[in-house]
Image (cartoon, rainbow, N blue to C red):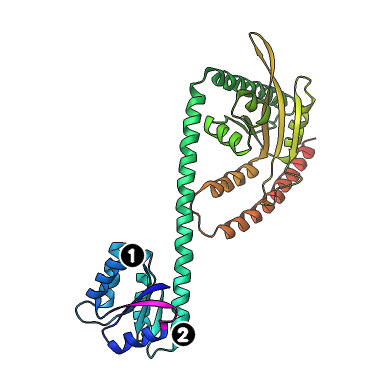
């Protein structure tokens, strides 16, 4: 049986509550706030609930709550106020201090039992959840430390650094091809097919974490065989048709091999994400010969990229309020962006036709 502490300067109230709860709980009694604190110090890990009168000699209920806050007991022990008052300001003050519920006088047996049972159950769930969160946080911290350690080992390994150099070379090859196309379009059509290029190499931490998460061995061969996004290039275009034109031109180059194509523009993800992804085998030329390296290219319009940046912040930010509402509004923005991209493209097409 769980133990509860009943604190009231009126002996009759203490006895009444004892009689109501004796079949379900072991009841400890205290006649004032000072005695209540002594009991709390003695039984703090055993007490499942505190039934507390507010108006008492020596030390009132508010002073008891204050001491419980200082000692951290209020986080583990639900407080139910015993009161004959129904003043809204008193109840609001108590709830602001962390009180769980009220038991009003005169006592109604079934109401008392249900309020005590519910308060204990709620705190039990809360404490279990907090414990799970702490355990998960400790596990994540341990995993993070392992990832950091393994990533440091990768950084110090010469073969790994050589592999990263090769991926960097592949990025340079892609960037050069894009710049050549950009220069050609500037001369032929008096406009540029893209606005900007962004590139990145996956960090050793991200590489190790992804291999572990997918159950692949952490070896150089595994990185080559199983990861397609170690080298990444993002191409930001003004209009959707520029995306498809560039992708087609890349796919037709005889030294480029298209491994996979994912069209999230025509088939957006459920959250509204839109982009065209190409996984390519790109040749690099080293002192000992030619070698193919995988590079992922993502093609987006300016609006798509702005949306993806905002969605990324939501995904990786630790504390965000009203997440569901933000997700819903982001989806609405994605739909609006799709319409805007096509409207802007139609306007550009009309401008081009008028020039002709």
Tell me if residue 26 is in the magenta stretch: yes
Query: Is 73 situated left or right of 137 in this image?
Result: left
Q: Locate the N terminus and report the quarter of the image it occupies.
A: bottom left
| Residue 142 vertical placement versus 27 (above, below) | above
Q: Which residues are magenta?
A: 21-29
Q: Does residue 40 lie above or below 240 as drawn?
A: below
Quarter of the image that includes the C terminus: top right
Left or right of 146 in this view: 71: left
Q: Is residue 86 visible?
A: no
Q: Is residue 110 left or right of residue 5?
A: right
Disc marking residue 111: 2
Would you say residue 329 sits in the magenta stretch? Answer: no
The residue nearer to you, when weighing 266 against 340, is 266
Q: Say what secondary structure mark 2 lies in.
A: helix
Residue 2 visible to the viewer: yes
Task: Find disc 1 in the rendering and name its residue.
Answer: 73
Where on the picture, by quarter, is residue 53?
A: bottom left
Give the answer, above or below, for where 99 lies relative to 344: below
Residue at coordinates 44% horizontally, 62% vertically from top-left?
127
Q: Which residue ends up furthest to the top in the rendered image?
A: 287
Of the pair 19 and 167, the residue shown nearer to us: 19
- The numbered mark, 2 or 1, whose residue comes first in the sequence reads 1
Q: Tell me how far mark 2 sits from mark 1, CA to CA.
A: 25 Å
Residue 257 drawn at (x, y percent) = 76, 25
Q: Are marks 2 and 1 in contact (CB under 8 Å)?
A: no
């Amino acid at each position: 049986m769980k133990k509860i502490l009943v604190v009231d300067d009126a002996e009759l109230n203490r006895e009444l509550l004892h009689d109501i709860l004796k079949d379900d709980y072991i009841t400890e009694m205290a006649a004032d706030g000072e005695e209540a604190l002594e009991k709390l110090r003695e039984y703090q890990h055993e007490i499942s609930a505190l039934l507390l009168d507010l108006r008492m000699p020596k030390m009132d209920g508010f002073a008891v709550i204050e001491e419980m806050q200082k000692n951290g007991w209020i986080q583990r022990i639900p407080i139910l106020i015993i009161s004959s008052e129904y003043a809204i300001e008193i109840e609001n003050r108590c709830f602001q201090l962390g009180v769980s519920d009220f038991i009003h006088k005169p006592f109604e047996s079934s109401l008392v039992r249900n309020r005590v049972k519910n308060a204990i159950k709620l705190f039990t769930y809360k404490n279990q959840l907090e414990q799970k969160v702490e355990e998960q946080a400790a596990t994540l911290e341990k995993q993070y430390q392992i990832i950091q350690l393994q990533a440091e080992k990768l950084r110090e390994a010469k073969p790994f650094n050589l592999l990263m150099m090769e991926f960097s070379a592949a990025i340079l090859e892609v960037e050069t091809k894009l710049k050549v196309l950009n220069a050609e379009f500037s001369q032929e059509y008096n406009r540029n097919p893209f606005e900007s290029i962004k590139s990145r190499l996956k960090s050793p931490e991200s590489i190790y974490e992804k291999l572990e998460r997918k159950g692949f061995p952490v070896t150089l061969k595994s990185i080559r065989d199983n990861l397609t996004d170690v080298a990444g290039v993002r191409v930001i275009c003004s209009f959707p048709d520029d995306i498809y034109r560039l992708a087609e031109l890349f796919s037709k180059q005889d030294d480029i091999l298209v491994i996979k194509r994912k069209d999230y523009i025509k088939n957006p993800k459920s959250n509204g994400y839109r982009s065209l992804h190409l996984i390519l085998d790109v040749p690099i030329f080293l002192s000992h010969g030619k070698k193919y390296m995988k590079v992922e290219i993502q093609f987006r319009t300016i609006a798509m990229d702005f949306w993806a940046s905002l969605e990324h912040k939501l995904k990786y930010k630790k504390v965000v309020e009203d997440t569901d509402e933000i997700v819903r509004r982001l989806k609405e923005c994605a739909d609006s962006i799709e319409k805007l991209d096509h409207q802007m493209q139609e306007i550009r097409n009309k401008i081009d036709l008028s020039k002709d």
